[in-house]
Image: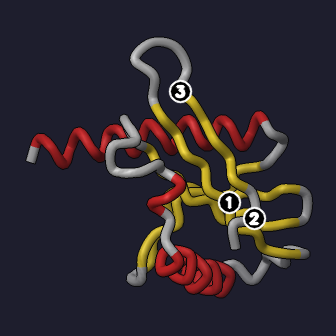
């Protein structure tokens, strides 16, 4: 159980870093960790009038592949479905478009984490 908690802590850290990164890039975070019975969206943000669905991947190392490589076609398809579900719950939101971004976070032993922001992966 301790191992799972450590992974959760790393994931939460990565999501905090990603939310700050998006905000500093001029986006507005609308919601974090939205869940339904089909899954979870890490961060929903607005970039102007575009809804950004953001998948956050945090990795301590690249041994198992990069964080961005962990976002598979199946995960992208699931994000598409989850976004449709989220929009059903928010009839007040009428974005001009929807974009899926990936924010990959690699914590540093010292200093700030390394962040890679991939825009429009789907």
Residue at numbered disc 3 = 113
Is disc 1 placed on a helix, strand or loop?
strand
Residue at numbered disc 2 = 120
In the rendered image, residue 117, in percent from the top left (x then y), is placed at 68, 46
Q: Is residue 56 left or right of residue 9?
A: right
Point out the residue furthest to the left here. Answer: 1
Is disc 2 placed on a helix, strand or loop?
loop
Tell me whether circle 2 and circle 1 mark residues in contact (CB < 8 Å). Answer: yes
Q: Residue at x 55, y 46 (%)?
A: 104
Residue at numbered disc 1 = 101
Q: Residue at x 15, y 43 (%)?
A: 3
- Label 1 and label 3: CA atoms lie apart by 18 Å
Q: Earlier in the sequence, mark 3 or mark 2?
A: 3
* Placement of 51 over or under 64, stated as above or below: below
In the rendered image, residue 69, in percent from the top left (x then y), is placed at 49, 58
Q: Give the position of the C terminus as an image quadrant.
A: bottom right
Q: Earlier in the sequence, mark 1 or mark 3?
A: 1
Q: Nearer the viewer, residue 106 or 43?
A: 106
In the rendered image, residue 65, in percent from the top left (x then y), is placed at 41, 51
Tell me whether circle 1 and circle 3 mark residues in contact (CB < 8 Å). Answer: no
- Label 3 and label 2: CA atoms lie apart by 22 Å
- Label 2 and label 1: CA atoms lie apart by 5 Å
Crowd tier of the residue under label 1, counting other residues whose Cα lies within 10 Å: few below 14, some 14–19, many 20 or above: many
* Placement of 33 over or under 29, stated as above or below: below
In the rendered image, residue 7, in percent from the top left (x then y), is placed at 27, 44
Q: Residue at x 57, y 30 (%)?
A: 114
Q: Residue at x 18, y 48 (%)?
A: 4
């Amino acid at each position: 159980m301790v191992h799972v908690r450590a992974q959760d802590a790393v994931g939460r850290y990565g999501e905090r870093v990603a939310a700050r990164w998006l905000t500093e890039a001029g986006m507005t975070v609308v919601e974090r960790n939205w869940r339904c019975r089909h899954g979870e969206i890490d961060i929903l943000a607005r970039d102007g009038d575009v809804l950004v669905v953001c998948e956050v991947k945090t990795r301590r190392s690249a041994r198992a592949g990069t964080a961005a490589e962990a976002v598979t076609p199946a995960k992208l398809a699931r994000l598409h479905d989850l976004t449709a579900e989220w929009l059903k719950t928010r009839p007040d939101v009428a974005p001009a478009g929807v974009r899926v971004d990936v924010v990959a976070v690699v914590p540093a032993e010292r200093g700030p984490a390394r962040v890679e922001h991939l825009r429009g992966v789907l």
